[in-house]
Image: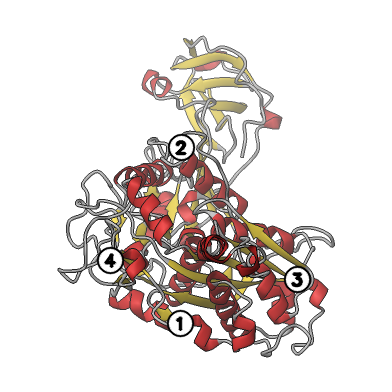
Amino acid sequence: MSNSSDSSQVPFAPHPVTAAEVIPGDLIALTPADAERACWYVVTHTLPETPETIRVTLRPPLGGTDHDEVLGRDRRVISGCRRLDAGTVPLLVSDDLASVEFREGDRVSSLRVVDPGADEVSYVRRWGVWHRDLDGGTGDDVLTDAEVRGWGGAETSGAGSGSGGEFVVRHHARPERVVAAVGGSRRVVVTGLGAVTPLGVGVDELWRGLLDGRHGIRELDGEEFAELPVRVAGTVPVDPMELLPRQAARRMNRAAQFAVLAAREAWGDAGFVAGGTRESGLDPERVGVSLGAILGDASVLVGGDRKLRDKGPRGVSPLTTPMTVPSQAASQVSLDLHITGEARTVTAACASGTEAIGAAIDRIRYGRVDIALAGGAEAVVTPAIMASFAAMRALSTRGLADGSSPSRPFGKDRDGFVNGEGAGVLVLEAEEHARARGARIYCEAAGWGLSADAHHMAAPDPSGAGVALAVRRAVRDAGGCVADVVHVNAHATATVEGDLAEAGALRAVFGRRNVPVTALKGNLGHLQGAAGGVEAVATVLTLHHGVVPPTVGVGSELDDAIGLDVVMGVARELPGGGRAGAPGVG
């Protein structure tokens, strides 16, 4: 609906005239009060009714239905001093909303057609309610189905097509999904999950631990940690060497061992045959690997340096260099499953795993590969790394004496993160490829976002502007709006400045909407380059099962400055009942 008469460029000069002076094309208000509240009509026809009266046919200037008024010839009306071509003003009738079956994505628009300067108001239905601004995040302009249906009964206020015909209300069914053209962007779905974390080996161990509110942070009892000021970390409770063939395991660093175990689990969970691409009947060139890591496993380089000092050059293993580089995890997964499409490593600090998943989404979207194993792997619980983090005053100094987690994301008494290790891997797949083989689909990997603070080498920008930009870009990349987001799995390292910056960013994006937020670092510690991979696994499970795990460590002492709806104490059902298409942000 629009003002097709294009009369808005002519200035108003309201003045009284008699009904006898009115001719077709005039814009009039029947009373001064009507003129005051911008209730105008276009005269489409005049006809003498009696010697003393005139029948005037009126139509709202922005379109609507006609109605007649019988006016005395001497009756004073208000002329807007504006002429319109009545033939260009459309005849419009409001839709009967009472008979419409509303669906997600539908739009209802209302236009106050008697006001030449009016703008159309639209509401879009998301998650059972109607939003005027899908990206505003205020939550103020939200209506129920009953309120929208009530528009049809409104008269001179609100939105509706009441007896005065002041409003025209239209229902616009959600558009049909457009199938991408050949060579265009493809939809990407998640078909498999794998994890090795401080809660145990396997996705089931991770998910049960999160729902139960347990943590896997442990005392570091090796003699090499004895002199450190902080001696707790989120360590994997099983030696990965025992779960892999001995000869293969000896050629992998600890992070690569985690990655291979997680990748094997995800591969099998996606319905593929153990052994790799050939055994599963896949073209290995159409499968890729994309893993994030900051260092991978720093202990190999440290150990090589120690052997050099103790035994000389001949004491250094030839495997030291290939087992040190951050790309070792991706290359070992590629070798283990015979994946030749690509083996990508992303190094972007603690965003490494998340960015690796985003890169894989794009590779599948645009046809470079059909399947990708994506996530992160890290093993940096070493004395030097622990000592460095402690010197930065970034680590929590709490121990385990009271039985609670020393990592307390968003907590009032948080004092730093807990270093951790592990791996999280997703199997991402082109939707048509997954459906063609009858795969179980967890959810869609709809979009991702990337930004940079450009603020400090280690500290976050206190404004949270970079985080907010990345979140907005992720929502836009998914083709969605802020109102679509029903859950956030936060990074939330439990540092004072970091949590405040992230919380400020989420408030800036979502406003006063109570989007349920959870953070996993109370359960796991900070898994560094693997954090994004494991948290992506948890986010997929949250959407799939419709349950948000509680945030461990915060207890009931949430920092008042956080200002978010942090899920605490017990798990909570997702809004909308856990539909697999529900968008979350990790």
Which residue sits at x=48%, y=47%? Answer: 134
Q: Amino acid at mark 1?
A: Asp
| Number of callouts | 4
**Contact, CB < 8 Å: mark 2 with mark 1?**
no
In the picture, which quadrant includes the N terminus? top right
- Residue 1 visible here: yes
Q: Residues within 10 Å of mark 4 (few under 14, many from 20)?
A: many
Which residue sits at x=71%, y=31%? Answer: 87
Nearest to viewer (mark 4 / mark 2): 4
Query: What is the x, y in percent for residue 264?
Result: 60, 82
N-terminal of the pair, mark 2 or mark 1, is 1
Nearest to viewer (mark 1 / mark 3): 1
Query: What is the x, y in percent for residue 464?
Result: 42, 39
**Contact, CB < 8 Å: mark 4 with mark 2?**
no
Where residue 370 is drawn, which disc sits there?
3
Residue located beneath label 4 in the image = 552
Q: Amino acid at mark 3?
A: Asp
Between the C-alphas of marks 2 and 3, the distance is: 34 Å
Residue at disc 1, secondary structure? loop
N-terminal of the pair, mark 4 or mark 3, is 3
Residue at disc 2, secondary structure? helix
Q: Is residue 225 left or right of residue 179?
A: left
Frontmost residue, 342 versus 183: 342
Q: Is residue 471 above or below residue 375?
A: above
Residue located beneath label 1 in the image = 239
Q: Residues within 10 Å of mark 3 (few under 14, many from 20)?
A: many
Q: Residues within 10 Å of mark 2 (few under 14, many from 20)?
A: many
Frontmost residue, 25 versus 280: 280
Nearest to viewer (mark 1 / mark 4): 1
Point out the residue furthest to the front here: 311
